[in-house]
C-alpha cells in the first residue's frame, strides 16, 4: 500500500533580489505519516523550505503541494486558512504569546478557526493533559521551563489536528534533558501517524527521530537518506527523492534515542 | 554637512509621514493663532484711532422740537456723567430721498438712477461743517455746501456727483445739488447743509428737531450707554428724547464682521496648539523608542548626549518650522478677505495684521514645540550606549494580562478580543491615541456644531421674506420687466403696488399653490430709529416661511408689530415698547409684541399686518407675494397658469431672487471646514503614527498569529479593535467638550455682530447629530489605524518571525 504524499515539491526555487537562490530547484516528496528531517548549515535554505511548505512564502518557480493543496497558488487569506487547517508549527524560541496564559495560547488557533468554545476547551484540556502540562494551564509562559514551553508550543500546534507538523529547531533552545523530552514527544506523535517535517542542525536528533533525512547545501538537496534506525516510511518502506549521494551515510548515525515513550499518548 | 546634520536629515527623511504630520499640525495651530490674535488686535484699532482723532461722540440724542427747545436741549449738557457735549444742532430725520432727473447715468440697461430711491436722509447743519468741535466730519470727495441749495450726503451714487437729490415726500419736494460726500464716524447724520439750506427744508415741510452730541465718563458698554441715555432723558422735558444713536452700534457695524471670526479662531488656535504638542510628543518619543539601537550606535561612534538630544529635537523642529512659516503666511493671507471691507469708512483700514503678531505667534509656537521635543530628546541623550546596543526587541508585555483574560471571555471573534486587550498592555500609548482622538473629536464636534449653526443661520436668511419658490410682483417690476425695479421709492406715487386681496385670491386659484403671503415696504419711517429702518406691511399668513421669533409672540391684533432683532438691539427696543410709524405725516403707534430674526433688507425692520395700517389710517403697501408651490409642481408650469390670472391685476410671476446668504458666514464656514479637516487629519495621522509604532513593536507577535492561521482580515480586525476602545472613550469625552466650546463660542460671535440668534441656530446638537459625533472618535481612531492595519496584514510572516 502506498500512502498519498503529504508534501510534494517540484523544482521549487526561491530567489531574493539578484543574489543566488535561497532554494534551487528542490524536488521532494514526503509521505503521510513520515517524519522527515532537514539538515543544513545556516543559510543553506532550511527555513526557506519550511516557509514555502507552510505557505509563509511563495516559490519563485516550481510548485509546492501540501496535503493535496497547491500552497504556492494560495493568496494571503487562503494560505492563512490553509495553515490553520493543515499545519502546526513549532519554533526554536517557542513563539508563545507572553501576555496570554498557557491555556489561552493553546486555544488561539482553534479560536481563530472559529471552533466552538466547549469543543476548543475540551481539546485544549486533552492536549495539555496528554503533554503533562495541564497543571500550568493558568500560568503565563515566562514562568515555565524551556521544555515546558516547547510542550505548550506543541500543544498549540496540534490544536486544530493539523495534517503536518513543522518543527523548526524544536530543541535548539533547550537544555539536553528538555531536548530529550521534546524528541520523545515528536517520536510519540509520529508513532501515532503525525507527519512531521523537522528542521534542525542536530544530526543526532534527525537520526533518532526521522525516517528520512535530507541535507541542504546552498539551497539544493545534496543528500536524501533513509534512517536506518527508524526504518522506512510507514506503509511504504522506501525512501523518496534523489538517490543517496556518496558520503551520505554519516547522517544515518548511531541511535541516540533515549528514554521510553513520554506522556504523549493519544495526541491526535 | 556635519555628522549631526546628516543624522538629522536622514531622520527627517526616514520619517516622512511623521514629519508631514508635525508640519500640518503646527500649520493649523499657527494659521488659527495668527489670524485670531491678529484680528483681535487689528480689527478695532482703526475705529478706536479714528474715534479719538475725530473727537467722536459716544451718543447722539435727538430731541423732539415740539417738546424741547434749543435751550432745554443744551441744558442736558449738565446731565450726570456727561464730560463733553456739542450742539444743539438742528436736524430733520427720515427724509425719503430720490435721485433727481438731472442724473442721466444708469445702473445698467434700462435702470436709470433718475427717479430711483436713495437712502433716507437725516439732515443736519452746524455752524462750521468742516470744523466741528465734536464728531468731526470727514469729506470723502467734493466740497462742503456753501449755498442754500447745496448738500453733502454720506451715501450718493458716484455717477450722480453734482446732480440733484429730491426729498420727494416733503410737501415742497425740495431739491439740492449734491456737492460732495462726507461721513460722521458715528453716523450722527447722513446729510449736511448750510443753515439756509436747512431753512429750505423746514420751509418745504420737514420737521425740525434738535440734536445733542455727548461724551461720557463711562461709555464702554451698552449698559453704560443706556444709563447715560437715561440721565440725558431725565435732564430733558418728559418725552422729549425721540431717539439716540450710540457709537457702539457703529463700532460693531464697522468691526463686527471681522470680530465674529475671533472666538472660533481662538478655539481652533488653542486646539491646534495642544494637538501640536501632543503629536510632537508622540512622534519624537516614538522616534526615540524605535531608534534606541540607532542611538546606541551613534553614541558608540562618539556622539555626545547633547548631540543626540539636539539631533532628535531638530528632527521635530525642522518640519514644525515649515508648518510655522506656512501657517504665518496663510494666517496673513486669510486676513485679507476677512479684513476687506472692515472699517473702510473710518479711513484707517488695512488688510494687514500687525507684524508683531507674525513674529510672536510663530516664535512662541516654536518654543513650545522645541520644549515638547526636547523632553524625549534629552531622554535619548541620556540612554547608556551599552544598554541601547543590546536592545533587540520590544520589551515583554507584563501589563494587560487581566485585560487579556477578560477579553478572551467576551463573545467576540478572537482577533477582536485580542485587539481589545492590547491598549491595556501599553496604557501610555493608548492614552496618546486617546489624546489625539480626543482633540480630533473635540474639533469635529465643535466644527459640526458651528457648521450646523451656520447652515441654520443661512436657512433663516433665505427664509422669511426671502422664502418661496417664486414671487408675484407688479408686471413692470419683474426681472425682465421694463421698470426700474425695486429701487423706486415706495412713497413715490408712481410706484406700482399690488391689490392684495385680488392678487391673493388669484394666486390661491392657481393649481399647485401651497402657500403665499404678500408684503411690501410701506414707506413709513419709525421715529428714533436709524434711517435704514423700514416698516413692512404683511398681507396673509407668513408662518410657513420659517421666520423665527427670538422673543415675544407674533402680532395678532391691529396696532401690534414685530421688530427685527437688529433694529431692537440698535434702537434699544424691547417687547412691550411702543414704536411710532410715520407715513406721509400721519403717525401710528405700534405696540412691539415680538422680536424676530429678520435679516432681509439690512435687517432694520418693523413688521405689522396690513390691517394695522388700514385701521390706523395709513396705507399698507403690498408689492410682492412670496409663493410656495406644492411638491413636484413645476415653477414654469405654475407661472404659465398664473400669468393669465394675474395679468389683469397688473401682476406677474417672477423668479425669487431671495438668495440672501451671508458672505461672511460662507467664509467662516469654509474656514471652519478647512481648519477642522486639518485638525482631524492630524489627529488621525497621530493615531496612525502611534499604531505604526505599536505594530512595529508587535511585529513578532503578529508573525506568530499569522503562523497560527490568522488571516489578513483577522489581522486588520485585531489592529483596528486595538484603537477602537480608546477612540470610543475619547469620542464620548470629546463630544461634550466640543459642544460646550461651541456654546461658549456662539455667544461672543453673536455679540460681535449685535445679533441674538434664534433657537434653531443655537441648538445645533440634535440627537441625529450627536449620535454620529459620539461614534466620530472611534471613526477617527479607525481611520488612523487603517493603514498600519493593512501594513500589518501584508507583513511577511517569515520576516516577522525572524524579528527576535
Image (spheres, coloured by chain):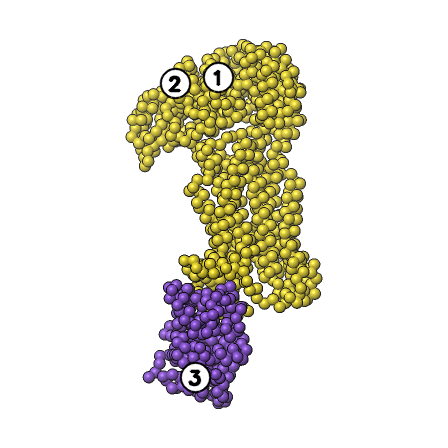
Q: Residue furthest front?
A: A135
Chain ID for purple? A
Pointers 1 and 2 within a single chain: yes
Drawn side of residue B22 relative to residue B786, left or right: right
Q: Quadrant of residue B266?
A: top right
Q: Earlier in the sequence, mark 1 or mark 2?
A: 1
Q: Residue at x 64, y 28 (%)?
A: B50
Cβ–Cβ under 8 Å for marks 2 and 3: no
Q: Does residue A243 lie above or below A121 as drawn? A: below
Q: Residues within 10 Å of mark 1 (few under 14, many from 20)?
A: some
Residue B103 visible in rendering: no
Check the residue under mark 2 and report the chain it is in.
B
Q: Residue at x 53, y 25 (%)?
A: B570
**Distance from Cα at disc 1 to Cα at disc 2:** 16 Å
* Figure quadrant of the N terminus of chain B: bottom right
Which disc, if any, is residue A25? none
Q: Secondary structure at mark 2?
A: helix
Q: Secondary structure at mark 1?
A: strand
The foreground one among B88 and B625 is B88
Which disc, if any, is residue A211? 3
* Figure quadrant of the C terminus of chain B: bottom right
Disc 2 target residue: B611
Chain ID for yellow? B
Q: Residue at x 46, y 65 (%)?
A: A104
Disc 1 target residue: B580
Residue B379: % across, % down? 65, 58
Q: Quadrant of residue B248?
A: top right
Residue B76: % across, % down? 62, 15
**Distance from Cα at disc 3 to Cα at disc 1:** 113 Å
Q: Residues within 10 Å of mark 2 (few under 14, many from 20)?
A: some
Amino acid at each position: 500500500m502506498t500512502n498519498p504524499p503529504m508534501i510534494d515539491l517540484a523544482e521549487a526555487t526561491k530567489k531574493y533580489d539578484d543574489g543566488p537562490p535561497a532554494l534551487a530547484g528542490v524536488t521532494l516528496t514526503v509521505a503521510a505519516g513520515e517524519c522527515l528531517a532537514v539538515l543544513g548549515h545556516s543559510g543553506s535554505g532550511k527555513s526557506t523550505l519550511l516557509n514555502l511548505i507552510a505557505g509563509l512564502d511563495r516559490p519563485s518557480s516550481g510548485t509546492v503541494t501540501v496535503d493535496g493543496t497547491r500552497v504556492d497558488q494560495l493568496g494571503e487569506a487562503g494560505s492563512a486558512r490553509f495553515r490553520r487547517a493543515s499545519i502546526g508549527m513549532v519554533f526554536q524560541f517557542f513563539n508563545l504569546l507572553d501576555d496570554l496564559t498557557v491555556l489561552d495560547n493553546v486555544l488561539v488557533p482553534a479560536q481563530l478557526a472559529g471552533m466552538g468554545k466547549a469543543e476548543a476547551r475540551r481539546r485544549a484540556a486533552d492536549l495539555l493533559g496528554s503533554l503533562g502540562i495541564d497543571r500550568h494551564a493558568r500560568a503565563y509562559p515566562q514562568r515555565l521551563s524551556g521544555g515546558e514551553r516547547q510542550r505548550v508550543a506543541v500543544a498549540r500546534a496540534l490544536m486544530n489536528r493539523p495534517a503536518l507538523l513543522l518543527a523548526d529547531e524544536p530543541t535548539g533552545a533547550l537544555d539536553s534533558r528538555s531536548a530529550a523530552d521534546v524528541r520523545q514527544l515528536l517520536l510519540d506523535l509520529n508513532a501515532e501517524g503525525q507527519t512531521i517535517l523537522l528542521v534542525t542542525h542536530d544530526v543526532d536528533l534527525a537520526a533518532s527521530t526521522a525516517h528520512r533525512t535530507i541535507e541542504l547545501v546552498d539551497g539544493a538537496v545534496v543528500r536524501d537518506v533513509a534512517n536506518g534506525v527508524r526504518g522506512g516510511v510507514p506503509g511504504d518502506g522506501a525512501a523518496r527523492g534523489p538517490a543517496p549521494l556518496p558520503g551520505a551515510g554519516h547522517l544515518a548515525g548511531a541511535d541516540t534515542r533515549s528514554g521510553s515513550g513520554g506522556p504523549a499518548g493519544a495526541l491526535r | 554637512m556635519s555628522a549631526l546634520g546628516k543624522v538629522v536629515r536622514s531622520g527627517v527623511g526616514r520619517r516622512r509621514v511623521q514629519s508631514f504630520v508635525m508640519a500640518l499640525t503646527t500649520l493649523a495651530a499657527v494659521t488659527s493663532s495668527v489670524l485670531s490674535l491678529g484680528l483681535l488686535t487689528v480689527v478695532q484699532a482703526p475705529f478706536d484711532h479714528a474715534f479719538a482723532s475725530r473727537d467722536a461722540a459716544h451718543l447722539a440724542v435727538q430731541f423732539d422740537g415740539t417738546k424741547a427747545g434749543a435751550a432745554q436741549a443744551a441744558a442736558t449738557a449738565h446731565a450726570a456723567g456727561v464730560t463733553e457735549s456739542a450742539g444743539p444742532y438742528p436736524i430733520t430725520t427720515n427724509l425719503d430721498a430720490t435721485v433727481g432727473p438731472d442724473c442721466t447715468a444708469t445702473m445698467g440697461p434700462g435702470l436709470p438712477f433718475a427717479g430711483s430711491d436713495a437712502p433716507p436722509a437725516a439732515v443736519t447743519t452746524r455752524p462750521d461743517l468742516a470744523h466741528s468741535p465734536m464728531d468731526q466730519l470727514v469729506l470723502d470727495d467734493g466740497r462742503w455746501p456753501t449755498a442754500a441749495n447745496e448738500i453733502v450726503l454720506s451715501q450718493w451714487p458716484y455717477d450722480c456727483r453734482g446732480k440733484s437729490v429730491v426729498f420727494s415726500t416733503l410737501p415742497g419736494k425740495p431739491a439740492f445739488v449734491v456737492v460732495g460726500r462726507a461721513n460722521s464716524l458715528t453716523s450722527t447724520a447722513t446729510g449736511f447743509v448750510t443753515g439756509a439750506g436747512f431753512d429750505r427744508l423746514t420751509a418745504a415741510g420737514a420737521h425740525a428737531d434738535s440734536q445733542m452730541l455727548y461724551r461720557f465718563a463711562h461709555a464702554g458698554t451698552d449698559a453704560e450707554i443706556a444709563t447715560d441715555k437715561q440721565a440725558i432723558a431725565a435732564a430733558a422735558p418728559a418725552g422729549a428724547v425721540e431717539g439716540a444713536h450710540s457709537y457702539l452700534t457703529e463700532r460693531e457695524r464697522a468691526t463686527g464682521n471681522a470680530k465674529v471670526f475671533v472666538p472660533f479662531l481662538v478655539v481652533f488656535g488653542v486646539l491646534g496648539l495642544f494637538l501640536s504638542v501632543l503629536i510632537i510628543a508622540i512622534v519624537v518619543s516614538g522616534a526615540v523608542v524605535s531608534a534606541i539601537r540607532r542611538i546606541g550606535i551613534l553614541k558608540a561612534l562618539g556622539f555626545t548626549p547633547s548631540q543626540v538630544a539636539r539631533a532628535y529635537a531638530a528632527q521635530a523642529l525642522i518640519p514644525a518650522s515649515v508648518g510655522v512659516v506656512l501657517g504665518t503666511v496663510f494666517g496673513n493671507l486669510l486676513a485679507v478677505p476677512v479684513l476687506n471691507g472692515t472699517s473702510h469708512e473710518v479711513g484707517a483700514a488695512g488688510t494687514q495684521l500687525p507684524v508683531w503678531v507674525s513674529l510672536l505667534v510663530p516664535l512662541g509656537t516654536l518654543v513650545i514645540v522645541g520644549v515638547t521635543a526636547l523632553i524625549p530628546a534629552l531622554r535619548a541623550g541620556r540612554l547608556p550606549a551599552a544598554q541601547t546596543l543590546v536592545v533587540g526587541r520590544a520589551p515583554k508585555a507584563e501589563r494587560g494580562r487581566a485585560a487579556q483574560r477578560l477579553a478572551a471571555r467576551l463573545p467576540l471573534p478572537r482577533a477582536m478580543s485580542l485587539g481589545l486587550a492590547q491598549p491595556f498592555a501599553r496604557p501610555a500609548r493608548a492614552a496618546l491615541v486617546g489624546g489625539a482622538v480626543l482633540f480630533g473629536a473635540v474639533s469635529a464636534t465643535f466644527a459640526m456644531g458651528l457648521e450646523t449653526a451656520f447652515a441654520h443661520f443661512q436657512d433663516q436668511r433665505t427664509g422669511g421674506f426671502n422664502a418661496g419658490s417664486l414671487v408675484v410682483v407688479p408686471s413692470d417690476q419683474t426681472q425682465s420687466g421694463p421698470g426700474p425695479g425695486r429701487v423706486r421709492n415706495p412713497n413715490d406715487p408712481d410706484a406700482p403696488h399690488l391689490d392684495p386681496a385680488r392678487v391673493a385670491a388669484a394666486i390661491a386659484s392657481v393649481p399647485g399653490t401651497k402657500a403665499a403671503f404678500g408684503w411690501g415696504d410701506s414707506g413709513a419711517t419709525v421715529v428714533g430709529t436709524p434711517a435704514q429702518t423700514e416698516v413692512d406691511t404683511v398681507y396673509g399668513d407668513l408662518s410657513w416661511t420659517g421666520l423665527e421669533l427670538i422673543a415675544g409672540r407674533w402680532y395678532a391684533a391691529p396696532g401690534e408689530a414685530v421688530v427685527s432683532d437688529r433694529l431692537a438691539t440698535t434702537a434699544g427696543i424691547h417687547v412691550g415698547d411702543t414704536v411710532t410709524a410715520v407715513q406721509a405725516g400721519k403717525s401710528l403707534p405700534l405696540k412691539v409684541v415680538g422680536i424676530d430674526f429678520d435679516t432681509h433688507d439690512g435687517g432694520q425692520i418693523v413688521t405689522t399686518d396690513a390691517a394695522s395700517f388700514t385701521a390706523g389710517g395709513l396705507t399698507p403697501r403690498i408689492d410682492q407675494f412670496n409663493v410656495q408651490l406644492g411638491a413636484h409642481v413645476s415653477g414654469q408650469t405654475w407661472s404659465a397658469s398664473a400669468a393669465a390670472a394675474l395679468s389683469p391685476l397688473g401682476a406677474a410671476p417672477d423668479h425669487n431672487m431671495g438668495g440672501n446668504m451671508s458672505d461672511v458666514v460662507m467664509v467662516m464656514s469654509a474656514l471652519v471646514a478647512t481648519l477642522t479637516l486639518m485638525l482631524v487629519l492630524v489627529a488621525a495621522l497621530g493615531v496612525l503614527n502611534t499604531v505604526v509604532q505599536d505594530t512595529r513593536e508587535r511585529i513578532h507577535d503578529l508573525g506568530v498569529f499569522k503562523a497560527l492561521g490568522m488571516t489578513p482580515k483577522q489581522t486588520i480586525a485585531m489592529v483596528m479593535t486595538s484603537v477602537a476602545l480608546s477612540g470610543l472613550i475619547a469620542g464620548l469625552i470629546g463630544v461634550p467638550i466640543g459642544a460646550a466650546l461651541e456654546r461658549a463660542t456662539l455667544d461672543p460671535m453673536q455679540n460681535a455682530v449685535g445679533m441674538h440668534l434664534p433657537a434653531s441656530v443655537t441648538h445645533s446638537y440634535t440627537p441625529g447629530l450627536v449620535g454620529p459625533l459620539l461614534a466620530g472618535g472611534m471613526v477617527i481612531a479607525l481611520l488612523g489605524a487603517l493603514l498600519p492595519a493593512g501594513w500589518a496584514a501584508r507583513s511577511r510572516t517569515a520576516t516577522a518571525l525572524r524579528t527576535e
